[in-house]
Amino acid sequence: MTLPEWLDPLYGPDEMRAADRFAMEQRGIFELELAEKAGAGLASAVEAVAEPGPIRIVVGPGNNGGDGLIAARLLRKAGYVVDVHAPLPLDGLEGVPRTNLDRLPGPAPQTFDVALLRDSGAIVDALLGTGFEGAVGEPLDEVIAAINAQGAPVVAADVPSGVNAATGEVEGPAVEATVTSTNHAPKIGLYVGRGARHAGSVRTVDIGIPPGDPGASLAGLTSRRVMQTIPARSRRGSKLEAGTVLVAGGARNSIGAPSLAALAAMRGGAGRVRLAVPTSTATVVSSRMLEALVHGLQEDRNGCHTEDGAETVVRLAMRNGAPAETIVLGPGMGNSPGEVSFARAIRRADAFPLVTTADALSATGEALEELAGRSGHTVIVAGPDGTARLLGEDPARVEGHRLAAARTLADRSKSVVLLEGDNPIVVSPGGPCAVGPGDTGALATNGTTDVLAGLVGALLSKGLEPFPAAAAGVFARAEAGKRASRHVGGADYTIASDFIDALPETLPRSMDLPSRTT
């Protein structure tokens, strides 16, 4: 599996071990050289955040602890007061870590004592490395709690202790780092799930592994380069060639969600956008959506969609007897019997490109089986609660195992899954994971998922494949959120429509990219 060029690689533990072997076995670089540069990078990170007071370095009996010992040596030579603490015996150290223990000038590592961490200028977590899995037990759980309680800047070596570097899972106590100094390349667990909350800012250290290592194949950070995958609108093309989107959703008491999705699709570059909403809402929606075509569909007595309306949606999405529209299904919908039947009938018209929110998927495995059998491209946009419902899992478990949950949903539905939350992730079935930017407080407001669904629908309608379409949608929404926050005076005051207004500043202009339309 090869990552798209618009993803900046995120390494897992196995890929990092392969990179180390490549450097040593194929390029003749000594392990001691790699470790020395890792320790130097760790020391540099400490110097960048240290406050007045002694530096306390807490080391474990492995390579991670060895990096901490190198940092201790370099910091002592630079004139810092450095105490080294070893919660576990170091008698069994071998190889490079043993060499660096023997090289340590000044006082030897001392037995860990919580009282000795007081008034630290900085604390270095060099306890557990990238191979850690599971929950931290005694006595390291108390050590981690003590580190977190000090209030001093904390620098983690490679990955915060207690964080699974491959998945971001945190199953017990974990260090809350101010900075993580990670070797060679960022690790998956520093950006996914709870691990991202423990990593702080991430500094990547060049430890001297030359180009040509096997590289990462499982996950990457979405870069601005993903915007270059978006086809430009032809100067001579019609509105239909620019992409057409049909948003099907809403109910009598929720007309805002489909309206936001439609507006986002228009700002996302679709040439024609239409809405299919319950009849009783059509007049109000039309008055707010001057540029979109609004169609009123059959509804039940509560103003919700019914199965009869699905036939109209499918007919509207046809042109010259063939599927011609990208359908965005679900914004503003509930789970009444009529709405469930409406959504099921649209899913079964399987040739259309489809973006579906979790609201439009029933809580049974039937919906996932239907999606798996579709011939058209499908993207599922869901948060942890919706994902948990579809998988029959507890929402807290999904939030704690975000990558595993997204992969499971993608594999079962044979669809691209966009899992909302901190640093949204996009997973293709059997393929890589794209970790997108989500670190904007502006996202914490109603309607931003509807904006995202409409935007992804617009990108799909332009002919973009579902994986880059979903990743580009996440990236563009995050950038729009930052711009919108600045414009209105802060994230606290940003609303979903502000994101939409900022999209033109975020998405590439037609003149910026060569046209792919013939």
Image (spheres, grey):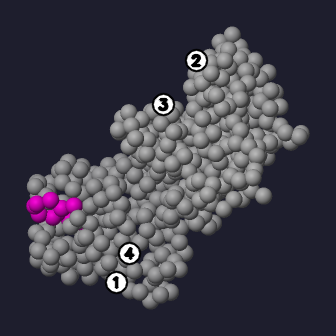
Q: Is residue 160 left or right of residue 382?
A: left
Of tags 1 and 2, the one toward the viewer is: 2
- Indicate the quadrant where residue 422 lies: top left
Judged from this view, the residue extending furthest toward the top is 301
- Indicate the quadrant where residue 387 lies: top right
Mark earlier in primary sequence (1, 2): 1
Task: Please tell me which residue lies in front, 37 or 135.
Answer: 37
Secondary structure beneath dot 2 equals: loop
- Read off the residue under disc 2: 253
Q: Residues within 10 Å of mark 3 (few under 14, many from 20)?
A: few
Quadrant location of the C terminus in the rendered image: bottom right
Q: Residues within 10 Å of mark 4 (few under 14, many from 20)?
A: some
- Read off the residue under disc 1: 33
The residue range painted magenta reads 49-60
* Rendered location of residue 197, percent (x, y): 36, 49
Of tags 4 and 3, the one toward the viewer is: 3
- Read off the residue under disc 4: 206
- The Cα–Cα distance between marks 4 and 3, rounded to whole angstroms, is 41 Å
Task: Name the amino acid type tagged 1.
Answer: Glu
Taking the magenta stretch, the answer to whether it contains residue 55 is yes
Secondary structure beneath dot 3 equals: loop
Could you tell me which residue is drawn at 85 percent across and 39 percent down? 319
Could you tell me which residue is drawn at 59 percent across and 53 percent down? 509
